[in-house]
Amino acid sequence: MDRSKRTTLTVAIAASLSMLVALPAAAQATWKPEKPITIIVPWAAGGSTDQVTRVTAAEIEKALGQKVVVVNQPGASGSIGTKNALEAPKDGYTWTAGAAKDLGTYAVLGMLDTKIGDWALFLNVANVSTLSVNPNTPYKSVAELVDAMKAKPGQISVATAGVNSSGHSAIEAIAKATGVKYKHVTYDGGNPAVVATVAGETDATTQLTVEQAEMIRGKKLRPLAVVGDKPIEIDGYGTIEPLTKTVANFKDPPNYFGIFIPKGVPPQVIATVEKVWNENIRNSKALKDYATSRGAQFAPASGADALKAVMPAVQVNAWQAADAGKAKVSPDTLGIARP
Amino acid sequence: MSGGPYPVAPRSDLNTALVWVALGAAIVVASWRMERMTAQGADLYTAPGLWPGVVGLALALLGGLLAWRSLVRAREAGWDAAAPRGETLVPTPRFALAAGLFLVYALLGVGRGLPFWLSTALFVAAFVFLFRRANRKVGDATGSDRGDAVLAVVCGVATAAVVTLVFEQLFFVRLP
Amino acid sequence: MFDGLVAFGHSLASFATPMSLGLILASSLVGVIIGALPGLTATMGVALMTTLTIKMPSAQALLVLICTYVGAIYGGSRSAILLNIPGTPASAAACLDGHALAKQGLAGRAMGIATSGSVLGTLTGMFFLALFTPVLGDLALKFGAYEFFWLALFGVVIAGTLTGGDPLKGWIAGVIGILCASVGQEAVYAHDRFTFGSRDLAGGFNLVPALVGAFGFAELLMAARERALPVKVNPFDSVIPRLADVARYWKTIVRSGLIGTFMGILPGVGEDVAAWSSYAAAKRASKEPEKFGKGSIDGLMAAETGDNACVPGAIIPVLTLGIPGSAPAAVLMAAMLIHGVRPGPMIMTEAPTFVYDVVAMMMYATLGILLYGLTLTNVLIKVLMVPKPVIVPIIFVLCVVGSFAIASRLFDVWVMLGFGVVGYTLRRLDYPVAPLVLGMVLGDLMEKGLRRGLVLSDGSLGPFFTRPISAVLWITIVVVVLLKFDVVRGLFRRRPRPAA
């Protein structure tokens, strides 16, 4: 009794205080960082998140006139680094980065108590997966591979970066749409999974196109289809057709990457970064070049647009986990509707 | 391996061996009871507990071998036969002091509200002063309390300043 | 071959900037000092420097680490000769003849021999690094999950066998390392193992803080037990190496270089074993084996050439297989991973110039130790005279701040402390620590190899035994264990008297 009364009081005080803080903040909308900003990349150095975040960090650095330091805190499917960003002082100097769908599913998997709404999202690129096979395998098209998977259920091996990875979501979506069974072989990350397919240890991979681009260009992988509804152009190779051409009922929403700032930081931080996003990132040549050379889609977005863009992937990911029996908390209770 | 004296007494080997056997057994049990992930289509050979179980078993077996060996050795040379090393497992006062300072600094001085530079300066200065004095007491060093105090403060302040500057200004690490 | 030379030339040129040259000079010096200070090992030096260089561009950070590594292995001979205390375990063999020579008033000559031996040893190993790595890289592509499992197991078994005198305890230490590696979220189902609900533990133990603890903090605890005795330095003559010494013992140099490189390539076998086996081989081949231990130039040359040749040798399996050849190389590999370089069979495809960059770094490190070998003696003696109470707390501060700096996590500081205490306890009970490190590095690889292999073979153990390379590997492991037959025999040796 006493306790709940005190809580109400605290909330009231906090609310009025934040009003006091918010009023002058809205007036002076720009934020001038006085010390280096840290972006925690919750994955290992050299991976797809790390690469795109470093390109973006350099652009933000130019725009804000302050050093942006990228710190790698890999481990536990990205939940450790994300947790540290969430628990850092809410002064606007600690951000994180990654795939937005992960941010939305940590709570479902019982890894971290956070929702996508707890974060201000600043998206930079959308990554899609490509279904590729080792060139020594006989499969020349999606149809041939699917037929083979139907003929030998659970015998065709597919390399991914593990449960929850983009590659796993992609092959799960394919399996669901075509009703095939496959042999799931997991690796330490996207690149090792791709390398295993190149070396012939596995027959196929569905990792991100950015992770396969080099090998596709070097003819060490044979791309069969982009796991999505738009074709992709890779410099030095040509066009990869979308999977929707062969598998009509296929649906896999794009996987957006970006930089995330936990809500609760001073509002002028969010306002300033939003401005940077609209003025600098949208026109960033470096980021555009990165995207086109790696087979990613340049897709800057912020605010409500960003949230709307990432929700489909969060829904698919969360419910995929729930249907596989991995969910500790039902996505329903977290307000994630079934896609 | 010629018969004794062994570097460590068979009794102490037996004790650690029993620790390994217990630890190994505990890990085997924990691995057996670990979730098998069958709901997600795992077979026994892909269950998360497989590997720790195998390794725990290996640890228990090796621990058993060590226990057996210490019995053989004890029968041969006696339970306490060990090569003289001029030291015992009992911590010396010097060791206790050093370990105490290390732990206080690392557990209480870092990330517990005290600024990093301050706790570092205090730790280094205290360490230098106390050990210089201890060395003088046993005649391993010369000097006075006063000289050592000055040295200690200089070392402490210099270390704190250099480490803080290098990490914060050069490497952009936010120190705790 | 010619392409390789061109690439090597490019790499050499890329480091010829004032910044890089400054780093080479500084880090070789740090390496030599760490090596010379008793109690500070090469592993600890490389681990500490990894934490200090975490924010540097990757090429420069690795340059610093390699210079530190080479410098530390060389620096150990200085205190071995001047103080009769091996600065690193690797220079224990150099102590025997080096200090004997010093007592005869020939400390300068002995240091000259150590310098020439170390330089030529490093060059020998470097030559094989450049020659073998690309070739072995192709071979390594034939390695699949099954082979990696055996290779990693081989590393742990042989590290347990050869480091420290007691294989049984070595294997136990290795197994404990493997168990440490299995803490945290596993790779296939992202299931948390042994985390007791802690999100920090779900990420597992970070390797570098663990190593800083096991080698750095544990050493400080060991050092804290002992009274710091005043240092007594032998007088010395000219330290300039004599060509005559090199010319006369060229056979020893070539033999020790080969042995050292080979010992380096063997997973888990470090510089100390390389030094001792080169020493033993030289003694066997010598016409005057009775002089060994009493100031034999042959013996000192063999020990110093062997341990330095081991350094590039130990990097060969890192680059080709992603399996470290020694404890410091394990740290170096961890550093490469942190910096986004993934050593392993694909390195020649993914980053073809990287191998030559490493060779070039090695080359500059060799020049660094040559330079300091000729000049540094007096300064080094002054450093050795700095009282321990000053050095110990500063190193500890670096252990703490370095562990933190890697990922800005306090948890890593606690990992460092925990592994320090465990490392200290194990060492006190006569367990070697190197296999623990190898176990931590290789445990992950073993598990993934095993489980991935089982997935690919649908649960059959067959391919683990029948694939050709796998067969060679498991038979070798069995032979290695059986060769340690005295261990097995030791278990069953009984006095005639029946049990009481």
Image (cartoon, grey):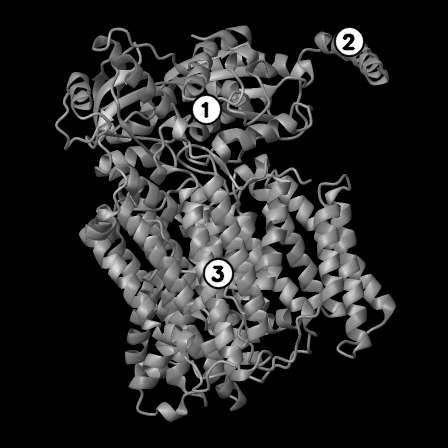
Secondary structure at badge 2 equals helix
Q: Which residue is mark 2?
A: A19
Q: Which residue is mark 3?
A: C173
Q: Nearer the viewer, residue A123 or B172?
A: A123
In x, y percent, where is residue C104? 51, 91
Labelled pair 3, 2 in contact (Cβ < 8 Å): no
In x, y percent, where is residue A54? 47, 29
Residue type at tag 2: Met
Q: Residues within 10 Å of mark 2 (few under 14, many from 20)?
A: few
Badge 1: chain ID: A
In x, y percent, where is residue C250? 29, 79
Q: Residue at 19% x, 20% y: name it.
A: A150
Q: Residue at 80% x, 58% y: name it.
A: B153
Residue type at tag 1: Lys
Residue C197 versus residue C348 in the image, above or below = above
Q: Are marks 1 and 3 on the same chain?
A: no
Q: Residue at 35% x, 90% y: name it.
A: C289
Report, in whole angstroms, how far the alpha carbon at label 3 lies from the one at label 2: 59 Å
Q: Could you say which disc has been placed on residue A326 in the image?
A: 1
Front disc: 1 or 3: 1
| Nearer-N-terminus badge (1/2) | 2
Report, in whole angstroms, how far the alpha carbon at label 1 lies from the one at label 2: 41 Å
Badge 3: chain ID: C
Report, in whole angstroms, how far the alpha carbon at label 1 lies from the one at label 3: 35 Å
Q: Could you say which disc has been placed on residue C67 in the image?
A: none
Q: Nearer the viewer, residue C500 or A222?
A: C500
Q: Residues within 10 Å of mark 1 (few under 14, many from 20)?
A: many
Q: Are marks 1 and 2 on the same chain?
A: yes
